[in-house]
Image (tube, rainbow, N blue to C red):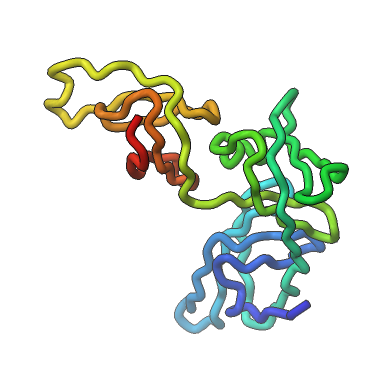
Amino acid sequence: MAILSYNEIVQKKVIEYNNEPYEVLSSHVFRMQQRKPVNQTKLRHLISGKVTEISFHQNESVPEADIDTMEAAYLYTNKGESWFAENGNAKNRFAFPEDMVHDKVQWLKSNSIVSVMTYKEKPATISIPIKIDLKVTDAPPAVKGDTATGGSKLVTLESGATILTPLFINEGDVLRINSETGEYVERVEKA
């Protein structure tokens, strides 16, 4: 476990702060007039998902969190919990509260493979690919004359999520979605 000085606490690092794992979302080292430099960071708690802002001063250091990853299959979401099973060991099942992983799970089909970050051998959070291909299951027909403003329509994907797409998208098309922003990227396959 490496010890990071205040200026090594940068974006994408996972640190241990108050004996809890945090992912660094952003960091900015600055100096105010005659004072010593400070690293202003925004941290996301890996387990609860809460975001906090912490300032690290020049004399402070924190340990890098001991994080491992494992592959797991997404099973289902029911009664406020999203269930997963370790790849190659179906008996090892675990769940996350739905509100903690909903922004990622909404893009997953059953049996989709995800990467699970583990902290002290317990599942902490999941990560999914940034670009995901999903089939359109429900798309209202485009209305003639709707294109004056470059129009868009709300479609439903096979994972159950709904997104805004251009009017030319039809039921059965396969779309590429940006899972971080929840936006339509392109049509991969036409129905």
Place residue 14 in its image quadrant: bottom right
Position of 13 compared to 61: left or right?
A: left
Residue that appears at 37% across and 31% down? 173
Please state the horizontal and vertical placement of residue 39, each as a whole percent of the image: 56, 73
Residue toward you, 20 or 92: 92
Q: Looking at the image, which residue sits at the far right? A: 91
Position of 155 compared to 161: left or right?
A: left
Residue that appears at 27% across and 32% down? 166
Residue toward you, 20 or 91: 91
Q: Reply above or below: 121 against 95.
A: below
Image quarter of the N terminus: bottom right
Please state the horizontal and vertical placement of residue 160, each as a whole percent of the image: 53, 26
Position of 39 compared to 77: left or right?
A: left
Count of numbered badges drawn on the protein: 0
Image quarter of the C terminus: top left
Residue toward you, 49 or 125: 125
Place residue 18 in its image quadrant: bottom right
Please state the horizontal and vertical placement of residue 172, each as a whole percent of the image: 40, 27
Position of 155 compared to 144: left or right?
A: right
Place residue 12 in its image quadrant: bottom right
Please state the horizontal and vertical placement of residue 167, each as a whole percent of the image: 25, 27
Q: Looking at the image, which residue sits at the far front? A: 191
Q: Reply above or below: 133 against 163.
A: below
Residue that appears at 61% across and 38% down? 105
Residue that appears at 45% across and 32% down? 135
